[in-house]
Image: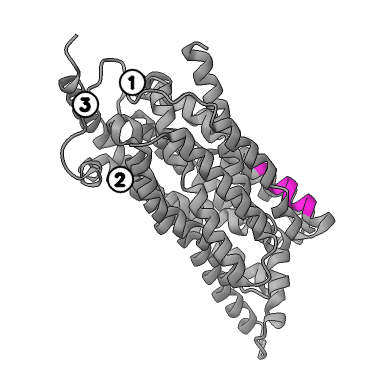
Amino acid sequence: MSDRPKAAYALAVLFAINTMNFFDRQILGAVAEPVRRELALSDGALGALGTAFTLLYAFVGVPLGRLVDRASRTRILAAGVSVWSLLTAISGAAGSFWSLFVVRLGVGVGEASCAPAATSLIGDLFPARRRARAMSVFMMGLPIGLALSFAVSTTVAAAWGWRAAFYVAALPGLLCAWAALRIEEPPRGQAETHAVGMRRRAGSPYLIVLSIPTVWWLILSGALHNFNMYALGAFLAPYLTRFHRLEFLEAGLVGMAVYGLSGIPGLLFGGWAGDAATRRHEGGRLLVGAAVILLSIPLTVLALGRPAGDVTGFALAMVLSCALMYGYYSAVYAALQDVVEPALRGTAMALYFLAMYVLGASLGPLATGMVSDHYTLEAARAAGLVELSAQALEPFRGEGLHQAMYLIPVLAAFLTLVLLAAARTVPRDAQALQRWMREQAPAS
């Protein structure tokens, strides 16, 4: 098999793995309301279940990132997919908050293998001029996985209960693990435009990566963006059922379009625009990232401002907003590859993901849930409610969650500024990397 078909096969498998990655992690968000009611959870506790996944995901990702830079990336992927698929199935047998919390911790361990190994492989399979487009295909698994999770999980849960939604996810994941073992491992640095010396710079790999100014800005951007995306993923379906009074299955289908399918044009546009912009300016990818986030802010405010029952108005504005938010991934993931040497890209992605998930994805659902609980109590007290039991608060949960969702556009404004700052440091960091790699290249 020639290099192009090998790269195409590898990218197809990596796309499938990433699809299952996001399918499995979104199941809980899709079936959040029946889980909350059966287990008698507050929104804070529901958010904590999302945090469980991200905590170990982030911390285990750092040593896995180092392992990715040293060992077989295809085997690491296959093992990770197998682990998270089996534990996702086990999630369906959980009988309490804590048993579900512990199993979701384990799912995070398995899924932590995906991004460092997959993005490192893509960096070695595709040259810089095609890297953002290849990354956008890989990241297409994100919206498609989320869309399928909303559609399949809510349909299965409506027919057979929320536990069955977890059981159906195991087999596709195990098939992906088998396919990963058939990817031919590429030499590190093979896709660079000139010979690359594979001697890594002396010193701590973590300190080397963190010595790059752009990496710090990207880490901060990842934390802010994942706060918003995971808050939205955890509470979109509950928001639709509580505030807009949709039935469970209807909320899942709207969530599929808003949070899932909207990402397809967003990722494609982000990859195409990022590659085009970087030909004009080395920080072009991040200027594209800043632009799409900035444009998403008024659309999010418009969507949240729609009155209860105006599902069409909410969905149209939020589809456009989410499509723009997804453009961030194609632009930023490729930008990280532009400033980090090939032998440390797995480590860089692991550090980036540590911040994305500990400071972003972990806090997003938890903080949004706690703010929702706060505004639920405020709404109940304003209505003159004296008895504040869980059952008595139920009619006020829609308004509480509605107020909490305004955290998203506020943090998006800060994210825009961070991406603009990162775009200023990329040219110097990218030029320094290219100069170092030329110096280390073996003589021809």
- Tell me the CA gap for discs 2 and 1: 21 Å
- Residue type, mark 2 in image: Trp
**Labels 2 and 1: the sequence-earlier one:** 2
The residue sitting at 42% across, 40% down in the picture is 116
- Residue type, mark 3 in image: Gln
The residue sitting at 39% across, 55% down in the picture is 59
Which mark, residue 280? 1
Q: Where is residue 437 in the image (x, y as percent from the top left)?
A: 21, 24
The answer to whether residue 148 is magenta is yes
Stretch of the chain drawn in magenta: 147-156
Q: In which quarter of the image is the C terminus?
A: top left
Q: In this view, does 339 lie above or below 249?
A: above
**Labels 3 and 2: the sequence-earlier one:** 2
Helix, strand or loop at label 3? It is: helix
Are the residues tagged 2 and 1 within 8 Å (C-beta)?
no
Q: Which image quadrant is residue 98 in?
A: bottom right
